[in-house]
Amino acid sequence: MDPLDKYSYWEDIAEYDLKTAEAMLDSGRYLYVVFMCQQAIEKITKGLFVLKSGEEPPRTHNILAIFEKIQFQPDQIMVKVEEYREFLEELLAFYISERYPSYKEKITLSVNHQSAVAILSKAKEVFAWLKSLKI
């Protein structure tokens, strides 16, 4: 597969994850809303890494760490990443909480319908921006 085909694979599964986040919101499973948002953003970012580098993506769930390895031109893209830094760090915390039960209980208490809606909305914004970078 060439890098564009690999990117398309990552984009497809990322879109599936974002739709799954919407389904989880509809069913009231708010922790899974934010977990699937994290997965969607991570996967589209990995797709961009493959597209821009031609290499396999790093084996990490830290979206910011993946971005740091992508050679974007112009540097204004990294300025935008900095705008989203706090949100991307928040998503990483949700990934960790889902994987580790001791954190899961604490995070579950902080995620309600309102916060899940806000995170999903922001994730859709970031996702749309990331898709625009494939050009």
Image: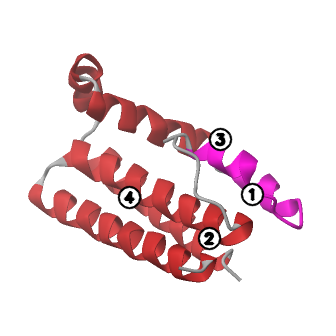
Sequence-first disc among 1 and 2: 1
Picture quadrant where residue 37 is located: bottom left
Q: Secondary structure at mark 3?
A: helix
Label ID, residue 65: 3
Look at the image and give the residue range highlighted in magenta. Answer: 63-82
Is 44 in front, or is 51? 51
Q: Is residue 14 left or right of residue 27?
A: right
Q: Secondary structure at mark 1?
A: helix
User: Residue 52's x, y, as percent?
Assistant: 72, 68
Q: Which residue is mark 4?
A: 120
Q: Amino acid at mark 4?
A: Leu
- Membership of 36 in magenta stretch: no
Sequence-first disc among 2 and 3: 3
Q: Residues within 10 Å of mark 4 (few under 14, many from 20)?
A: many
CA gap between label 3 and label 1 equals 15 Å
Sequence-first disc among 4 and 3: 3
> Is label 2 in contact with label 4 (beta carbons under 8 Å)?
no
Q: Which residue is mark 1?
A: 80
> Is label 2 in contact with label 3 (beta carbons under 8 Å)?
no
